[in-house]
Amino acid sequence: MKPVILQGEMSLIVLRLGLLLSVRVAGCLLLAARGVCAGETTAPTEAPHSEHAVELDEIVVQSPEPKFVAPTRRDRIGRIWAPVLIDGKGPYRLVLDTGANHSAVTERTAQSLGTPTSTQTLALVSGFTGSAMVPTISVTSIDIGAFALGPTNLAVLADVFGGAEGVLSLSELSNERMFADFAHDRLEIAPSRRERAPKGFAVVPLRMVGGLPMAEILVGGVPTRAIIDTGAQSSVGNLALRRALARQTPRKATREDIIGVTLEAQSGDSLPSPDIQLGHLTIRGMRVVFGDMYLFEHWNLTHEPTLALGMDLLGSFDVMIIDYARREMQLQLRPRAVPH
């Protein structure tokens, strides 16, 4: 982390958090990829299968409640939590956010660490919907398995993480491998051995841009830049992508409010997406919220079609691997989604 502005005794840290907390539709919380509200049930719709096609309504219910890796299912969107030691204390349960460039903790977590917050070193937090100045705490170490960071400053945010105790950024990884097994509630971050994807896995080439893992995909045949964002609950597209798809998407849209980590809200239109080509996979039955979101401007991604892929999609796989050394994402389909 590098301070970018100095004002006397006060240093300003620029923080980007890709975490998208919730999408609200006409007053109800979007709990799953198909926009089911609390208390409602919607039967899966049948669609013709083709080779390497994934239907987002293939949701597996799992019990008991996962501790670290929760899959996307019909009644909720999945999440990845990392057990993290901070200055040897914990473990704390942090949301693993590949769309963030720095880590942050809640006010309660900061208090439990016994580290006083600093108003002399402020962080400018940029979320999906806006930015805010927040205090920080200084820590000497952050440990998750074989992955260690520190010393560093952590932004201190309101308790907006849905029960988690903060957010963990992976932007500093370069030779590591993140392994998330949604079927067996397993998360591992370890040095990469540069292994090829296991048999049966789909491979999506990545490139790192400012710490963000990005892929080149096709949305309805439109070349699109995709941001792999495990901190976002829902997938969000910019207006450039919507304009490119204008002839392929229905005109009637559901108006939705998106709430980011700064608790600011922006509105967008939820529309069914045409087929998405992700590597050799075809994704069907997905909805995307389109809007002029603050974070796209912050990323300088307002002019070319861009889609932030959230956990509504990423959590629908059995296994997701991001190998930072190989610059690729490896995905294993759920058994019911594998064509026969």
Image (tube, rainbow, N blue to C red):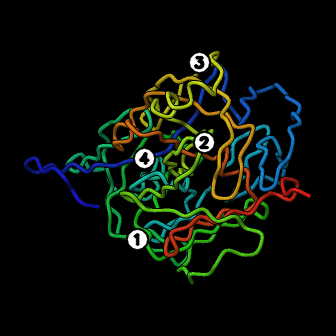
From the top left corner, tell me how far across and down residue 204 is, in percent.
60, 62
Q: Residue furthest bottom?
A: 193
From the top left corner, tell me how far across and down residue 251 is, in percent.
62, 17
Q: Amino acid at mark 4?
A: Leu
Label 3 sits on a secondary structure element that is: strand
Q: Quadrant of the N terminus?
A: bottom left
Q: Residue 41 appears in which quarter of the rendering?
A: top right
- Looking at the image, which is closer to me, 20 or 223? 223
Q: Residues within 10 Å of mark 4 (few under 14, many from 20)?
A: many
Residue under numbered circle 2: 221
- Per the model, the C-alpha gap separating discs 3 and 1 is 41 Å
Q: Is residue 275 left or right of residue 138?
A: right
Q: Residues within 10 Å of mark 2 (few under 14, many from 20)?
A: few
| Viewer-nearest of discs 3 and 1 | 3
Disc on res. 255: 3
Q: Residue 289 appears in which quarter of the rendering?
A: top right
Label 4 sits on a secondary structure element that is: loop
Residue at image x 81%, y 25%?
39
**Which of marks 3 and 2 precedes in the sequence?**
2
- Per the model, the C-alpha gap separating discs 2 and 3 is 25 Å
Q: Amino acid at mark 1?
A: Leu
Q: Quadrant of the C terminus?
A: bottom right
Residue under numbered circle 1: 149
From the top left corner, tell me how far across and down residue 60 is, in percent.
84, 49
- Per the model, the C-alpha gap separating discs 1 and 4 is 18 Å
Q: Amino acid at mark 3?
A: Arg
Residue under numbered circle 4: 17
